[in-house]
Amino acid sequence: MRPKTDYLFKVVIFGDGGVGKTTLVKRYLLGTFENTTMTIGADFFVKRVKVDEKNVTLQIWDFGGEEQFRFILPQYVSGSSGGIFMFDISRYMSLNNFDDWLEIFREEYSKKKKINQTLPIIMVGGKKDLAEKRSVEKQRAQEIVKSQNLLDYIECSSKTGENVDKIFEELSREMIQRIETFEIEKQARD
């Protein structure tokens, strides 16, 4: 028998094509590394996890990063609890469209939000195993995170598995904390 879900969260992973979004999701879900083909539109996955003694169900939406699919991103952002923006640390160009991605994501969220907060977004630098080919310095990514008020910056490797679970755990903790804070504030007002 499956344990009762305490929290259900929709998480959207977005960023340019070829940065490793699908590979990240597959590593997180299956614990394996496999080369994948480009996502057409969006793929949807579900994972049940325990975070700080709470049963969490994550609906993970892996959004195709090609330019021709960007127009449908707002439909997938609707109802999101959190986001992961991913780029490839070995391809500086994969960071070039960050402002566009973030604007689409935040604009749609601000139309639908129920809580007077920004959406928690983690910036992820993928392909850490290619550090010798690095073209985006960690300090540059951290500056962007600070200037855009994002939750955190984490580098990971879907190939080795380094920090993959950490990304989803940190985002889950933040989403839980925001809901619990909202509930406490609501009870205080009532």
Image (cartoon, grey):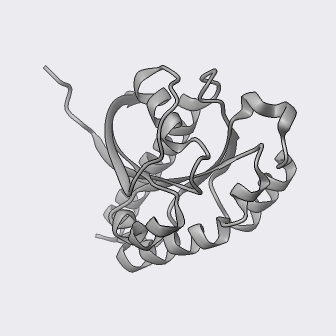
Q: Is residue 186 above or below residue 170?
A: below
Res 73 quadrant in image: bottom left
- Specify whether 142 is left or right of 179: right
> Which residue is most to the left?
1
Quarter of the figure with the N terminus: top left
Residue 145 seen in the figure:
no
Question: Percent x, y for residue 178?
Answer: 46, 55
Q: Which residue is pictured at 43% across the width and 74% down the height?
A: 71
Q: Which residue is pictured at 67% across the width and 64% down the height?
A: 149
Quarter of the figure with the C terminus: bottom left
Question: Percent x, y for residue 56?
Answer: 33, 37
Q: Which residue is pictured at 73% across the width and 33% down the height?
A: 128
- Specify whether 83 is left or right of 127: left
Of 146 and 183, nearer the camera is 146
Question: Percent x, y for residue 30?
Answer: 41, 23
Of 97 and 154, nearer the camera is 97
Residue 90 seen in the figure:
yes
Of 44 and 121, nearer the camera is 44
- Specify whether 94 is left or right of 4: right
- Specify whether 44 is left or right of 128: left
The count of marks equals 0
Q: Which residue is pictured at 69% across the width and 56% down the height?
A: 94
Q: Is residue 85 above or below residue 109?
A: above
Question: Percent x, y for residue 65?
Answer: 52, 57
